[in-house]
Structures are given as C-alpha cells and as structure tokens.
C-alpha cells in the first residue's frame, strides 16, 4: 500500500514527487511480476525469521508462564527461574526451530499476501477494490496465513516441546527424531488447527490494521504528502504503524496461543481438552508479555520488510486514493 509496499493495485494518483523522495527511486522489478513476488517473500523470510529468533528468551518465558503458571508467575520472575535452572544459555533454548519455522512462515505470509492482494483486487475492479479495501486486506492476509501456518507447524511443535517440557530434549536435532519416533507425523501437525486459530486472526489484524494505520498517519499526522517524504521518514511511519497494529494483534491471538503452547507440550492432548482445562482466566495468562513481544515484533517485521524493499528497489505504491470513476459516482 504505502511505504510497506503492502497495498493492492488500487487506483492511485501519482502526484508530483520530490527528487529526494523514496518513491522517486526507479523500481528494479515490475510490480506484481513473479520476481517481485519472490523478493517480497524473501523480505518476509528475513523479517519474520530474524525478529522471532531475536526474542526467543521472551517467547520462552511467555510459553512457560502459559504451561506452568505456578512456577513462572511473571515475566521478571520467569527470567530469574529460567536462569537459575538452566543458566543464561537456557534463555536461547529453541532458537533453531524458531529460526527455521518462522523464516518459512514469513516467506509464505508476505509473499502470498502480495499475490492474493493483487488477484483479489483484479477480481473486484478498481472501484470496489478501493471501497472494500479493508475487507480486501483481511481476505488476502487470511488466505496467505492459511498456507504459511502449514510451513510453520512442524518447527513450532518442536520449539514448544524443547522450551516447555523439562528433560525431553535440548536441541532441534534431539527433539525432531524423538517426536517422530513416538508420535509420527501427527506430532508436527496436531497443532495446526489451533495455530490457524491463533495466526489467522493475528495476521488479518497485522495487515489490515497496519495498512489503514499508515493511511491515517499520512492523512492526519504526517505534515506533508507521502510523495515528499524521505525514505527514513517513510520507514518511521512504517515502524509506528507496525507497533500499533502489533498491540491489537497480540490481544486477538493470545487465547489461541495459550492453547497451542499447552497442546504442543503435552503428548496426546487435544485442543478442546486444553481449552476446557485452562478456562477463561487461563487463556489470558502471559498477555502482557505477549503484547510487549508482539508489539515490538510486528513493528520490527514491517520495518525490516520495508527496508528490504527499499534496498532492492522494489515498487512501493503510494497510499490509495479513490479512482475518478468512484468519485463521480459519489
């Protein structure tokens, strides 16, 4: 859409652009081309893989608060207990499946979002694509996340098992064959349904809220048109909009995240059984840690993704404006 390159090919008015503006750089690839979409996937791979790996210590404590709230009562005490039991190295437990899993998820999440966004906009036409743009963002992101979670599920299952089940396995190499030997392929995909429950609402909020927040920031907050903003200024807007979107993402996805954590920890458990056992209060354990984690995570992901597009000189369309035919109808 905007600085993120996150909008469908809605009808936009180009306007006069500053020579120093970021959007004045000649794109290296045509918008919507296969190479463009692959590079968007690469940007998503870097943004998701790097950011999730960087916050493994916080994610580890959050997961342990969800599955063992009696021992891990809060963020600070959770860190203290982890360091006491496992040392500083224990805070990095699960980094390998995190890096692999979320890199794959990011590739499909961002790459397929661009694909579905373009295709859905073509089906709607310029007027409807603009009028229903929020719904378009929601549909495109939900479609992309459905496939992205299939790529994430195996490594997510390994990560949670390594982080939350004491004595099971300390590394990816140890956990992977043991899980397969004990439960077969089901061990890696039994959490995909609750993963959809967690990730699809999260991603819908992540993309739609981000897109509309960027649009609002340029309209009401930024004192000059987007076309006159420098690359640094546009990246700053990206970061702010990403953090705002991340707070809402954390709230809508947290209950399902609690179920996924317990489900992947316990052999033979079911999503419905975990849901009944946790109860309403248990579903919200660790919410503050998740808001802190996801807010920062989402902002950094959008910042990295947009920075990759700037570095590779990929097309970054301006914020959408109503096509002339739509304005005449009004």
Image (spheres, helix red, strand yellow):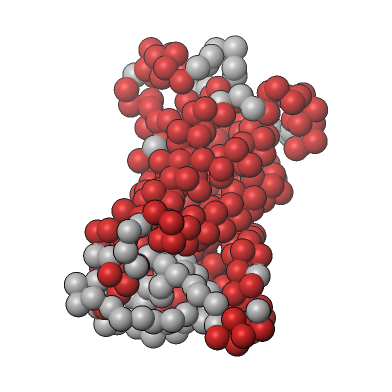
Residue 291 seen from this side: yes
Camera-side residue of 30 and 41: 30
Whether residue 140 is visible = no
In the image: residue 226, left or right of residue 294: left
Q: Where is residue 16 in the image (x, y as percent from the top left)?
A: 30, 81
Q: Closer to the camera, 186 or 116?
A: 116
**Viewer-proximal residue among 65 and 237:** 237
Q: Is residue 309 above or below residue 91?
A: below
Of residues 306 and 54, the one drawn nearer to the viewer in this rendering: 306
Numbered circles on residues, count: 0
> Residue at 59% of width from left, 12% of height from top?
70
Residue 277 lies, in percent from the top left, at 77, 24
Q: Is 139 positioned to the left or the right of 45 in the image?
A: right
| Residue 7 picture location, percent across and down | 50, 70
**Residue drawn where x is 39% and y is 85% of the image:** 30
Vertical position of residue 261 compared to residue 205: above or below: above
Q: Residue 279: x and y, percent?
A: 76, 24
Q: Left or right? Give the position of 216 relative to 125.
A: left
Q: Residue at x 57, y 58 (%)?
A: 208
The residue at the point 28 percent across, 65 percent down is: 229
């Amino acid at each position: 859409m905007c600085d993120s390159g996150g909008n469908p090919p809605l009808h936009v008015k180009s306007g006069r652009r500053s020579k120093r503006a970021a959007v004045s750089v000649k794109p290296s690839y045509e918008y919507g081309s296969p190479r463009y979409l692959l590079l968007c996937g690469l940007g998503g791979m870097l943004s998701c893989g790097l950011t999730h790996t960087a916050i493994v210590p916080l994610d580890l404590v959050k997961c342990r608060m969800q599955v063992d709230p009696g021992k891990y009562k809060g963020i600070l005490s959770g860190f203290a207990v982890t360091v006491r039991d496992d040392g500083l190295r224990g805070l990095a437990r699960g980094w390998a499946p995190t890096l692999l899993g979320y890199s794959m998820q990011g590739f499909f999440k961002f790459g397929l979002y661009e694909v579905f966004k373009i295709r859905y906009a073509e089906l709607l036409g310029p007027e409807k694509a603009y009028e229903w743009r929020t719904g378009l963002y929601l549909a495109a992101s939900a479609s992309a996340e459905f496939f992205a979670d299939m790529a994430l599920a195996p490594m997510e299952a390994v990560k949670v098992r390594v982080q939350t089940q004491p004595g099971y396995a300390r590394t990816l190499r140890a956990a992977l064959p043991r899980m397969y030997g004990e439960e077969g392929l089901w061990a890696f995909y039994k959490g995909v349904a609750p993963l959809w429950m967690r990730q699809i609402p999260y991603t819908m909020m992540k993309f739609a809220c981000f897109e509309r927040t960027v649009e609002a920031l340029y309209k009401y907050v930024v004192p000059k048109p987007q076309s006159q903003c420098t690359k640094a200024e546009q990246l700053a807007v990206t970061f702010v909009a990403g953090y705002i979107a991340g707070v809402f993402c954390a709230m809508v996805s947290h209950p399902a995240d609690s179920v996924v954590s317990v489900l992947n920890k316990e052999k033979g458990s079911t999503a419905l059984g975990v849901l009944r056992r946790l109860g309403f209060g248990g579903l919200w354990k660790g919410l503050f840690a998740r808001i802190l984690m996801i807010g920062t995570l989402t902002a950094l992901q959008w910042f990295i993704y947009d920075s990759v597009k700037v570095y590779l000189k990929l097309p970054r369309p301006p914020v959408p404006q109503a096509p002339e035919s739509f304005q005449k109808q009004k």
